[in-house]
Amino acid sequence: MSDENQILIPESFLDLHRDRSRTRLRTPVAQVRERYELCEDLSQQLVAQAQHIHFDLGVSEDEVLVRIEQGLAQPESDFSEDEARWVTRRLAELLMWD
């Protein structure tokens, strides 16, 4: 087994790429893994920015998350709406925000 195959993709992310009726992946697993790594890395990178917006600029936690999700959901971001939502939820989790 190669190192890249040892990455555990959470079910919440796999669900973004599943056929709802058959619960099978609609996307090749290598591509899902690549998208997961991108989304997880972005979530980690957004922690400091979200904290800055919240604490230094006085924007509420909810509003920070809404703004980030809206930005990621724009067509030019190359993230799907589902991925934007997942990144935002993961960010909230990392920040321990409700």
Image (cartoon, helix red, strand yellow):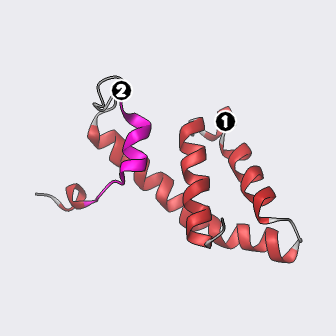
Q: Residues within 10 Å of mark 2 (few under 14, many from 20)?
A: few
- The amino acid beneath tag 2 is Asp
Residue closest to the far top: 21
Determine the residue positioned at 50% across, 53% down. 39
In which image quadrant can residue 64 be found?
bottom right
**Who is closer to the viewer here, 36 or 93?**
93
Residue 81 position in % (x across, y down): 60, 36
Q: CA distance from mark 1 to mark 2?
A: 25 Å
24 relative to 76 in the view: left or right: left
Region rendered in magenta: 7-20
Q: Earlier in the sequence, mark 1 or mark 2?
A: 2
In which image quadrant can residue 43 be found?
bottom right
- Check residue 76 in the rendering and tell me which mark sits there, or answer none: 1
| Residue 41 within the magenta-colored segment of the rendering | no
Q: Residues within 10 Å of mark 1 (few under 14, many from 20)?
A: few
39 relative to 64 in the view: left or right: left
- The amino acid beneath tag 1 is Glu
